Image (tube, coloured by chain):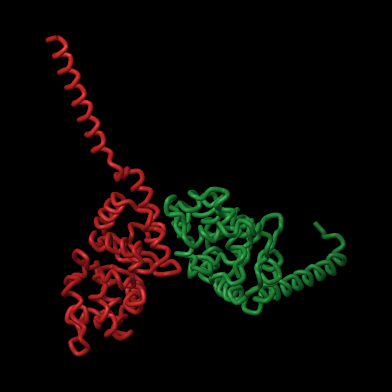
Chain colours: A red, B green
Amino acid sequence: MKADGVKLAVLSGLLALGCAAAVRSYAATPADTVSQRDVAAKLAYCEVCHGVEAQGFRGYYPIPRLAGQPTDYLKNQLQAFVERRRTNNIMFNVGHVLSPAMITALIDDFHKLNPKPLGGAPQDIVPAGKKIFGEGLPDVKVPACATCHGPEGKGNGPFPRLAGQLYDYVVAKLTNWDKERGQDPGKPDTSAIMQPIAHNLSQSQIKAVAAYVSTLE
Amino acid sequence: MKLPNARILRPISGCAALAILLVAVFTVAGRAEHTGGGLPAKIAYCKDCHGPSAQGFLGYYPIPRLAGQQPEYLANQLRAFIEHRRTNNIMFNVAHSLSPSMISGLAANFRALNPPPLGGSPRRLAEEGKRIFQDGMPDANIAACAACHGPQATGAGIIPRLAGQVYPYVIKELVNWGKERGQNPAIRDTSYIMSPVAHSLSRSQIEAVAAYVSSLR
């Protein structure tokens, strides 16, 4: 009787240990983890289009620099592609297969990269762009870009880094802002902030700002 | 020692001098054809192998379409043959005698041609090829071809046009990418961008993409 009780206690203990071990092993391998190898392969894939060290690349389209970008911004944009808030068929396909763990790993990596700007902007309009970036254009209700994007254009949280971004990419984004961003009326997003600003900038002002930010390291 | 038959030698020397003169005249004439005035002759020479409208040709090897090709790409490839970045003995010999102005003249001429595709690819593969080309295979880390080559596969700058390219040529290039391109370790070129893509594609995926692009006008 006593022996049976001991046996039962031992069995219960073993069972509890077994359960604990099972729970622990479950916690160690939840459905959403990602191996270093898979992350490395995915990064190499991103860099096919986004360039060496994600410094940006000129394919058929100007493909943006991701290096040094705030993680919040990158995450929000990947979600925006998947949710069709931002229209881009290629990036929709890229984005919708990424697991949350993969997204976290990728954006951390891109944020840490710090290559030189790709270059290729007209230098003569850089001073005009610097002035707009730092002071805004009060007459046409354009606030200083530095207010949100930071004095060095490094961005913060949902506000993207512009430093070193491709000249032609920035021009294309500002020119097409409301044809590409904020495309789901049911899900208004932070892109609404830039809409009037992009709208109020003239093409030559857009080019000047784009030239300036593209030179920032 | 007395020279025998001096009288006989004299007319022979005269003939030799005339022969040398004639050779010199023809050489100068030939050279003139290969600079400024020789562009039509050089184009005709290219078309011997690349087809009457440079639409490509199936010789012993599949010989690529040059019609509609990006001039920057053509110039870069001609330099790549010369610099042994791209290994092809025939094209090395063709390219290394071309002056820079001849190269730009040829590239502009081929760019302006627009014959229909040569044809000859299996049509049943084109649909899968279209999907790979436009969307990529994000799960397999294969980038959408359209991101760099453009949605109509027309290319841009150093990135080649694929529309209408000869089916077996596209297959040959993708299968042998790392053995044919980027072969001069001292001169790194843009061919490295395609290395991981070409390497990741299976034979049947390569055939599908090749079938699709070869059908595009």
Residue at left offset 35%, top offset 43%: A37
Rendered location of residue A18, percent (x, y): 22, 26
Query: What residue is shown at x 49% (from left), y 62% (from top)?
Result: B134
Dividing the picture into quadrants, the one containing residue B88 is: bottom right
Q: Is residue B125 above or below residue A152?
A: above
B46 lies left or right of A199: right
| Depth order, front residue of B10/A134 | A134
Identified at 86% across, 60% down, the residue is: B4
Percent across and percent down for residue A189 are 25, 70
Quadrant of residue A57 in the image? bottom left
Seen in the picture, residue A45 relative to A210 is either above or below; the reply is above
Q: Nearer the viewer, residue A62 or A86?
A: A86
Give whichever of B181, A104 is nearer the camera: A104
Give the quarter of the figure containing the N terminus of chain A. Answer: top left
Give the quarter of the figure containing the C terminus of chain A: bottom left
Q: Residue furthest bottom?
A: A139
Whole-percent x, y for residue A158 in the image: 22, 65
Residue at figure coordinates x 79%, y 67% from the top left = B16
Which residue is outermost to the left? Answer: A2
When asked about the image quadrant of residue B51, the answer is bottom right
Apparent side of residue A28 relative to residue B199 in the rendered image (left or right): left
Provide residue A122's location: percent of width, then percent of height.
Answer: 34, 78
**View extreme (front): residue:** A1
Nearer to the camera, A22 or A203: A22
Left or right: where B144 falls relative to A144: right
